Amino acid sequence: MAIRVPLYQREFDALCSLAFNVGDIARIAPGLCRKINSGAYSDAAKEFLDITNGGISGLVKRRRQEHGMYLSGNYDSTH
């Protein structure tokens, strides 16, 4: 299990969205997992913005949506 600390629902949902899209978040985003597990929840949110395969526009938009979901519970489902 990549995340071993309690999460708010919005954080869990954002991480589920990320995992659905990238697979093994422990392998793809170790910094994100490390920061969350150490209690640096808000610092971890920035890590979402770096998982874009070099800035592919669709992934940039998706990661911004997950970032917003993680921080504030903003469930933006626009495409």
Image (spheres, grey):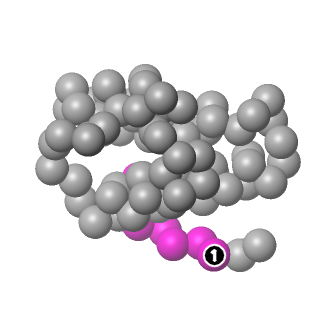
Decide: few, some or many residues near mark 1? Use Cα within 10 Å; few <14, some 14-19, many ≥20.
few
Magenta highlight range: 70-77
63 relative to 75 in the view: left or right: right
Question: Is 36 left, or right, of 49 in this rendering?
Answer: left
Amino acid at dot 1: Ser
Q: Name the image quarter holding residue 51.
A: top right
Which residue is located at x 79 percent, y 29 percent?
54
In-front residue for pair 72/57: 57
Examine the residues drawn in magenta and state their main secondary structure.
loop
Front position in the image: 71 or 62: 62
Answer left or right for 2 relative to 6.
right
Percent x, y of residue 31: 43, 24
Residue labelled with disc 1: 77
| Residue lying at 53% horizontally and 58% vertically, measured from the top left | 20
Q: Position of residue 5 (x, y in %)?
A: 16, 42
Q: Residue at x 75, y 34 (%)?
A: 53
Q: Residue at x 60, y 54 (%)?
A: 21
Q: Is residue 16 above or below residue 6?
A: below
Residue 5 visible? yes
Q: Position of residue 43 (x, y in %)?
A: 39, 31
Image position, residue 71 (x, y; %): 41, 53
Number of labels in the image equals 1
